Amino acid sequence: EELFDVYQQIGSLQGDPEDLFDSNLLSEQHLALYDRFISLIQQIKVNPIEFKIRFLGDELGDRGECDFFVIKILEKLHLHQVQFSILISNHGFAFMSCLQFLFLNKHQLPEEMMIDSQSMRSYVYLRKLIDAQWLNYEYLERFMEEIYYPHLELLDYGLSIDGDDLNIYTHAGMNLLELKKLADDYGVTWQDSTVFDLAATLDQMKSVFKATKLQEIILILREIYQINDADERLQVTQKKLVNKPFWSIIWNRSYSDIGPYQRQGNFFVHNIHGHDESCPSSNKYYVSLDSPLGKCFLPEEETRLFTLNRWFYKTLCRQEFSLAEYHLKPKYTPPSLLSILSMYTMPSLNMKNCLLMSGLIYLFRNQLSKYFGIPFLQNIFDRISFNSKDFSKLLKN
């Protein structure tokens, strides 16, 4: 609660990002709140966890109060060895590009900006801290080299525990055709005859991306960025993005031709993205985790944080595996009938209890057969006589 309160107080002091080119607007009260924020972050205890956090992009250089907050949180996760990945995105790219420009040219705002200052307000506020010499370049360079870039990913994926479906995580909505074009650009042979072939293909694409130096990524994206006129920076058209799948994965907004994620052989593919909410709601194989949270500019009389807090943010939680993890996970050994029955506390295995047990097994036979196998269930039915009328009568009583 105190961390939230400090964040709220800082937000109330920020003012209009258009006025923040003057670093003198930083008051002692303002800087003292940042110091308090650092102190609170240091006090937070991180419990050991065995799951992975995926950030679908736009974590920096967006409409938040200041990128410094996110930087400190990512630093905390990294120092405590929490598994997390950051998917490359349009705002994340703009942030990286601005920092590179800043490191080389020092004081060039607003020339370094690739997105307008309102839509990159969190970076503008970070620049203000730098210009006030409260934050130095060396700290940001270390953060980028040691924390941000090692966790930066082109895309991510997760296999279900049964290996019958695969989630592909990208910042902007992408179909398999566009991903195949990107694989071709990377010199990766596209294979998707099985879910494991597709996972291996995605792993290869991720490896090519990780082997690319950060400066090269920025240069590639800046070169592609030149295809847009200055007044069309936020209106990237699909026509101009033909044969530019790398750009599409961070900025695609055209969903009319995106096509469905159809069943691939004996498995399903879903695309989880977070760029915007404009996706084919009729197609259940696309899931957008985007929301209005943090995207609106509010009247001056309203406290920014309180208003935004009325909306919801979206998360997706699922047990899933990378290809390497899937093959290493322990094989499941079905329990015996005796061990199942022993899990239930029964006065005795009289006819009534056996009838109840066999009835429940019958009701959930589809789910049980998935994990224990048909022969196992058949063995149970051979041992316990079952009469559906008697079971219905028992449930009614």
Image (cartoon, grey):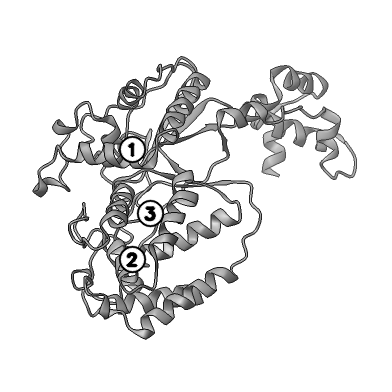
Q: Which mark is residue 382?
A: none
Q: Residue at x 23, y 41 (%)?
A: 222
For the question of whether residue 311 can be seen, the reply is yes
Q: Is residue 381 left or right of residue 73?
A: right
What residue would you read off at disc 1?
Answer: 216
Q: Nearer the viewer, residue 327 or 121?
A: 121
What amino acid type is highlighted by mark number 3? Glu
Disc nearer the start of the sequence (1/2)? 2
Q: Residue at x 9, y 43 (%)?
A: 229
Q: Secondary structure at mark 3?
A: loop
| Circle nearer the viewer, 1 or 2 | 1
- Mark 1 surroundings: few (<14), some (14-19) or many (≥20) residues within 10 A: few
- 365 sits left or right of 8 in the view: right
Query: Residue beneath label 3, please?
Result: 59
Closer to the camera: disc 1 or disc 3?
A: 1
Q: What type is the residue that disc 1 sits on?
A: Glu
